[in-house]
Amino acid sequence: MRQKIVAGNWKMNKTLEEASILTSELMGMVADEVKGNVKVVLCTPFPYLYPIKQQLGGNARISVGAQNCSEHDSGAYTGETSVGMLKSMGIPYVIIGHSERRQYFGEDGKLLATKVDKALAQGLTPIFCCGEPLEIREKGTHEQLVKQQVEESLFHLSAEALQKVVIAYEPVWAIGTGKTATSQQAQDMHSVIRKHLASKYGAIAENISILYGGSVKADNAKELFSCADVDGGLVGGASLKSREFVEIIKGIS
Ligand code: PGA
């Protein structure tokens, strides 16, 4: 059985106080309302990771994740955060290769492969993002591109290492646009990704959680999450409001 995960990507939003209020609301609502075996991950800005982790205490359902990490171990890289630092704070997850990192910070497949390696070496779970921009979808080469993104950054891994990775498929045209992929489009791509993993790794592809991201909302989560190969979501804007986010989480549990 694949692990179901709903991760909130807060991006560069909220003050520390607002972050703390959101977390305490979520702790209450998740405890009272969420039934199934779903993991909730709050991907907060770097400065809030440790305080939010402290606030969560030993919460069994909710944990924290970083939104990025450096490809370097340590040294003169002003403004960067290493995976070793995340590990030293007990942070279990890290998003790698979000389309905003690819687009605004020029991160490419080779660099992301290094980040994935760093995360795995320190025992963190990478949430590796892939997804096509609109022009590629319109050209009809989206499956090819996403397969290539997965190949470039993950196919060097051993089967054992791959099993520790979570994948998030996020079509760029659906991120923050209010335009969600249909459940059929999501299922089709998730199945393409899983089959591509199976072509190299065989049956273990069945164990890899593949999340959908891109304008997931309370009113479309249930349908998206009911697809056979969709194991949860990576949620941006809608994860910033406790009621909305909890309704999304309930869509899978
Ligand atoms: P969105 O963002 O839910 O606001 O579309 C998703 C993401 O970027 O991870």
Image (cartoon, grey):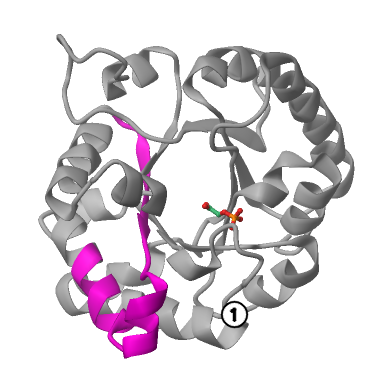
Q: Is residue 176 left or right of residue 23?
A: left
> Residue at the location (57% across, 18% down)?
48
Q: Is residue 116 above or below residue 253?
A: above
Is residue 29 shown left or right of residue 83?
right
The spot of residue 235 in percent (x, y) is 61, 52
- Residue 146 x, y percent position in the rendering: 29, 72
- The picture quadrant for ligand 1 comes to bottom right
Q: Quadrant of residue 207?
A: bottom left
Q: Is residue 164 visible?
A: no
Residue closer to the observer: 84 or 47 = 47
Q: Badge 1, how many Cα within 10 Å: few under 14, some, many 20+?
A: some
What residue is rendered at 86% in x and 46% in y? Answer: 243
Please tell me which residue lies in front, 7 or 97.
97
Viewport quadrant of the C terminus:
bottom right
As drawn, 147 above or below 39: below
Q: Secondary structure at mark 1?
A: loop
- The quarter of the picture where residue 67 lies is top left
Q: Residue at x 45, y 19 (%)?
A: 90
Residue 30 drawn at (x, y percent): 80, 41
Q: Amino acid at mark 1?
A: Cys
The residue that label 1 is drawn on is 227
Look at the image and give the residue range highlighted in magenta: 123-149
Task: Tell me if residue 146 is in the magenta stretch.
Answer: yes
Question: Is residue 57 visible to us here?
Answer: yes
Residue 93 drawn above or below residue 145: above
Q: Report the side of 167 relative to 36 (left or right).
A: left
21 lies above or below 187: above
Which quarter of the picture shows residue 181? Answer: bottom right
* Residue 55 shown in magenta: no
